[in-house]
Image: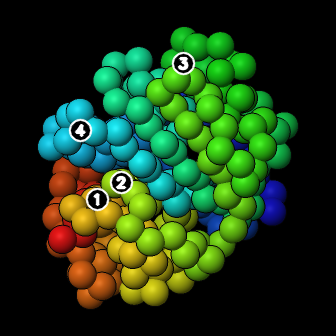
Amino acid sequence: MKKTLFKTGDGSYTLHIPEWGEQYHSKHGAIAEARHVFLKEGLYHWLQINPLEDISILEIGFGTGLNALLTYLETDNIAVRINYTGVEAYPLKIEEVEKLNYSELLNISNEKFLQLHSSPWEKKVTVSSKFQLTKEQKRFLEISTKNSFNLIYFDAFGIRVQPELWTETIFKIMYNALQKDGYLVTYAANGNARRAMQAVGFTVERLPGPPGKKEMLRAKKI
């Protein structure tokens, strides 16, 4: 599927899929969206409640690796270790990743970013003393993990283009993958998605969204 480079509102690039009229990140700011949804309302919300516990994170849609990169960089600021699993059915090619300008904007070496993409799939890799990465190439329906994760970054393509990823079937898999009192965060605030989460047992709250978006969702397994 063809992808083109798209400059978002905060200057960071994302990839645009012309066939779908859809981007990998918000057009209002790729980095800004990731920091707000997944770090502020996900990682740091969990750490406020569990400040001294190591955390296991599942990312649904590894994509450009931006969420993994930002989470990895945050290990410089927190005491706990992160075990990060990214699931992606259709990994990007390295030449597509190399066009992204995250390293420049975050003032880090590009090698640090590309390391996440060049690491092997289906294998746990120690990226640093506080960050371990496992990338799994599979469809979300194939996830069978139970009671393993504290936090899910749900960053699938939007419900407009892939409604099958925002159903009770998918969210039941997510619910099962989380430990008790674990959280799922997503940029979406669609009513159908929220009701699907609630139907499988999640308690769902609406939160202020990232730039350009009124709301987002955070769901808790109780």
Q: Name the residue beneath numbered marker 2.
A: 151
- Which dot, 3 or 4, sits closer to the camera? 4
Residue 158 in picture, x, y percent from top left: 49, 67
Q: Name the residue beneath numbered marker 3.
A: 105
- Which dot, 1 or 3, sits closer to the camera? 1
Q: Which label's residue is closer to the chain start, 2 or 3?
A: 3
Q: Secondary structure at mark 1?
A: strand
Q: Which label's residue is closer to the chain start, 2 or 4?
A: 4
Q: CA distance from mark 2 to mark 3?
A: 26 Å
Viewer-closest of 20 and 206:
206
Question: For mark 2, does the 10 Å Cα neighbourhood hold few (<14), some (14 to 19), or many (20 or more) residues?
Answer: many
Q: Name the residue beneath numbered marker 4.
A: 47
Question: For mark 1, does the 10 Å Cα neighbourhood hold few (<14), some (14 to 19), or many (20 or more) residues?
Answer: many
Residue 56 falls left or right of residue 111: left
Whether residue 74 is visible here, answered yes or no, is yes
Q: Secondary structure at mark 3?
A: helix
Amino acid type at mark 2: Leu
Identify the image's colour scheme: rainbow, by chain, secondary structure or one colour: rainbow
Q: Name the residue beneath numbered marker 1.
A: 183
